[in-house]
Image (cartoon, helix red, strand yellow):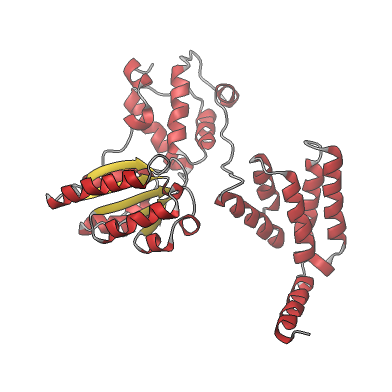
Amino acid sequence: MCSEDAAYRPLAEHLRPLSIEDVFGQDHLLSGDGPLGIMIKSGRLSSLILWGPPGTGKTTIARLLAKRGNHRFVSISAVFLGIGDLKTLFVEAREKASDGITTLLFVDEIHRFNRAQQDVLLPIIEDGTILLVGATTENPSFELNGALLSRCQVLLLRRLGENTLEMILSRAEEKMGCRLPLTPRAREALCSMADGDGRYLLNMVEVIINADLSITLDSDDLSKILEKRSPIYDKKQENHYNLVSALHKSLRGSDAALYWFARMLIGGEDPNFIARRLVRFSSEDIGLADPQALQLSLAAWDAYQRLGSPEEELMLVEAVLYLASAPKSNSVYNAFTSVKQLIKRTGS
């Protein structure tokens, strides 16, 4: 059994690494020849944007960089602070700078800052009053000003792999002084349910510990007490367009199309949106190589609207597999594009 103190302390905070060397899963950044490893070795840290999925260590890395460089660490959330609040922070940072203390300002969800708030950061970064470390789950190229990006190095954090999650799980058990009551397959399932998010994994561990179980859980038991995390998918953000692009390209290459279709559907995408993409693909990428593709795509869409979910899914699956297997030709698209360009050049 776990000790009471260990069981009820927030694990994500309790297990936060105390040094850069203890951070798991980001060796491409923190190793000796990685960008952060090189900065740490040289003792010269530049302003950074840490871009990556939730639970991959963005906040932890920022804290440890401040600790390693003996910088004053100030953490804020872009959701709650306005320009006036930022200016107050800058005054404090200048006062500390006059005493030889550099402030590392960590801005969580920096993509939430509007353009004006981002612009306020520019001079304070440029004159060296602060080192900025921003964290975001969104593509900085889409969400941040070019001027701000030009003053920061963008570093991509990777989703945590199964081996890394197992290391975090073992470390949690060591700290708690107990082993989780899981069969080997249930243990694998637990890591899989975390979907690359270390924080989410530790939250699930707390649920298991707090359940005060007297049995060893198998995979089925585990699923009863834990809600499986849905694949990350936001219909209004960049991940939406990433998956749309993945589906389109896999249809074109006849590879993994059904996987990307299912990712979108399970993530909550409107089947009508997917059906529209399939119709477009049948004309743009298959075209005259197989005119039947357009008819089948329209028929699948019509069947969905007649039957509704979940029966319609098989009709869309049939369309996805047909389009992925069909011969491809973009001659219709290329011909029409060429004609439009010709008309623009020659007029009437």
Above or below for 192 versus 227? below
Above or below for 313 versus 290? above
Q: In the image, what residue occupies the spot 39% across and 37% down? A: 167
Q: Residue furthest front?
A: 84
In terms of depth relative to the viewer, which is nearer, 217 or 152?
A: 152
Q: In the image, what residue occupies the spot 69% across and 62% down? A: 253
Picture quadrant of residue 77: top left
Residue 22 appears in the rendering = no
In terms of depth relative to the viewer, which is nearer, 76 or 26?
A: 76
Q: Residue furthest left?
A: 99
Number of labels in the image equals 0
Q: In the image, what residue occupies the spot 68% across and 58% down? A: 248
Quarter occupied by the C terminus: bottom right
Residue 280, position as x, y percentages in the image = 76, 60
Residue 321, position as x, y percentages in the image = 77, 52
Residue 339, position as x, y percentages in the image = 77, 79
Q: In the image, what residue occupies the spot 40% across and 46% down? A: 25
Q: Residue furthest bottom?
A: 346
Residue 117, position as x, y percentages in the image = 39, 51
Q: Is residue 175 left or right of residue 275?
A: left
Quarter occupied by the N terminus: top left
Picture quadrant of residue 5: top left
Residue 167 appears in the rendering = yes
In terms of depth relative to the viewer, which is nearer, 171 or 89?
A: 89
In terms of depth relative to the viewer, which is nearer, 256 or 197?
A: 197
